[in-house]
Image (tube, grey):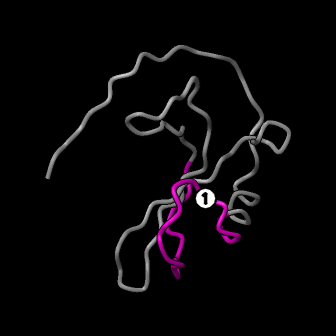
Amino acid sequence: MDLVKIWRKLEYAGDVRVISPEKAYELLQNGEVLRKPMSKLNLEVVKIEPGYYAGGIGEKQEYYYPVWIFHCRDNFGKNVTLAVNALTEILRE
């Protein structure tokens, strides 16, 4: 297994409005997540926390943007982490 680390310089870019955790949960239920799983999963949400999305290697990204991170467990007891874009509808693209 290889480990890759991406070093990025971060600067404060301003404040944005974010959706509520409840709205993010609705989006999660509708499958509106970043980096979708390959198949539909039956998940139990264990924890929800705010965070920021950082694209992977080769993804052009000018800003990190806020997300709601859902720590879940599938039917086999495996941990699954999914993120939902937390920007308000006005700023979502």
Decide whether residue 45 is among the magenta residues: yes
69 with respect to 81 (left or right): right
Quarter of the rendering occupied by the C terminus: top right
Q: Which residue is denoted by mark 1 in the rendering?
A: 33
1 with respect to 77 (left or right): left
In the image, 59 versus 41, the foreground residue is 59
Residue drawn at 39 percent across, 21 percent down? 8
The picture places residue 32, in percent across and down from the top left corner, at: 67, 61
The picture places residue 60, in percent across and down from the top left corner, at: 51, 29
Q: Is residue 13 above or below residue 64?
A: above
Residue drawn at 43 percent across, 79 percent down? 74
Residue 12: quarter of image? top right
Q: Is residue 6 above or below residue 93?
A: above
The picture places residue 31, in percent across and down from the top left corner, at: 65, 68
**What residue span does the magenta drawing correspond to?**
28-49
63 with respect to 71 (left or right): right
Residue drawn at 56 percent across, 30 percent down? 64
> For the view shown, which residue lies furthest in the right direction?
90
Which amino acid is tagged 1? Val
Q: Is residue 5 above or below residue 75?
A: above
